[in-house]
Image: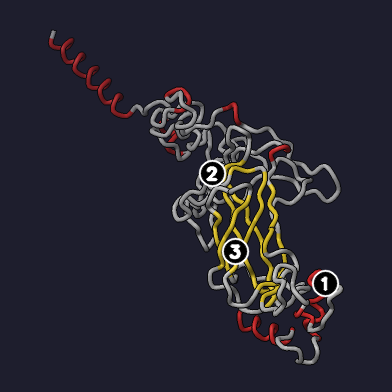
Amino acid sequence: MKCFKLSFVFLAAAQFSAALFVPEPNGLVARQNGGNKKNGGNKNGSNNNNTQTGGNNNTQTGGNNNNTQTGGNGGNNNPQTSLTLDPSVIQKINGKGQAAGEADSLVSTDNFINFCVGKTITNGLQVQGGSCNPTPMGDIPSVNNMPSVKFEFPPNGGNVQANTEFTIVMNTNGMQTGDFTNAANTYYAAPQQLNNAGQIIGHNHVVIEAIQALDSTQPTNPRVFAFFKGLNDVAANGKLTADVTKGLPAGAYRMSSITAAANHQSVLMPVAQRGAVDDAVYFTVGGSGNNTQAGGNNTQTGGNNNQSGGNKTQTGGSNNQKGNGGKGGRNGRSYERRFLTWQ
């Protein structure tokens, strides 16, 4: 009897000792491959070194619905709050270039959801040192709902008085204007959206840059501009306006529009071959003519060329460099010196 009891004790102790050292199913493999039990990770033991595609075990997508902490698609039926990728939105793209000169495109089995891993995330901020934005591009309108804009004032080739207030007028079409988010903490933070009519929900901007002459071919410095304003109001009868309250110094300028979705990203279009969304015009400041909208007596060329008037502003730039040898008031040379120091 004593021998039987002693054998029973030894048997129980052996079973208890074995239980202490039996690993959980796949636990050792998961730890070797960097898996995370809470996140689903690599509980099935596969390698998860490729954060760009992640296979089926990417901790960001929850693997094969093993992510019980984030719900996966099995634990959270709302695809807009789930932290896993819904299979219905996975793209299947042939990224190979088809024609001579075409570059191959990056492709992904998980829509690039981990593309920004290891990089500085934009996170709604205007990161001047550069960043990576994980937000999807969003809704794209039909070809019948592509927006466009055109400046009305100052017109291309026009002239306004120096250091005098004037109002920019921009005509818009095909877009729901007046919608903008906080650019300080929601910059690029949400996808482009469409309204019930299929139009982009967004807003516009205008920027004016000083240039050396109307015919200048020198690229501008995007960090240097004479005037910038977000046109955040709803367009009235298709028109947006901005007041340049202090006017501008005498010189030559380029004025451009920047059309954006609500979160400030440039608008996305459905086709590559199309007309431009944005507009740019070239005008002068400081002429003494009476007709400021048409350029008066073309004072930038220094002559009395009334036949061509303000319409000859496209060729006027070359005359700004020659002028009349410094005669005739503010000539092209004075502008050139001014804006070399301006920039």
Is any atom of residue 7 visible in this view? yes
Secondary element type, mark 1: helix
Q: Quadrant of residue 107?
A: top right
Residue matched to label 2: 135
Q: For the C terminus, give its image quadrant.
A: bottom right
Reply above or below: 203 against 207.
Answer: above
**Identity of the amino acid at label 1?**
Lys
Residue matched to label 1: 312
Q: Residue at x 75, y 92 (%)?
A: 326
Q: Report how far apart the C-alphas of labels 3 and 2 lie in the structure.
A: 36 Å
Reply above or below: 185 against 342.
Answer: above
Query: Mark 1 or mark 3: which comes first in sequence?
Result: 3
Q: Residue furthest front?
A: 290
Q: Nearer the viewer, residue 53 or 21?
A: 53
Q: Position of residue 26 (x, y in %)?
A: 43, 28
Q: Report how far apart the C-alphas of labels 1 and 2 lie in the structure.
A: 47 Å
Label annotation for residue 167? 3
Q: Position of residue 226 (x, y in %)?
A: 59, 71
Q: Is residue 163 left or right of residue 297?
A: left
Q: Residue at x 55, y 64 (%)?
A: 243
Q: In this rendering, which labeled residue sits more in front, label 3 or label 2?
A: 3
**Identity of the amino acid at label 2?**
Thr
Q: Report how far apart the C-alphas of labels 1 and 3 lie in the structure.
A: 23 Å
Q: How is the model colour-coded?
A: secondary structure
Label annotation for residue 19? none
Q: Residue at x 57, y 64 (%)?
A: 228
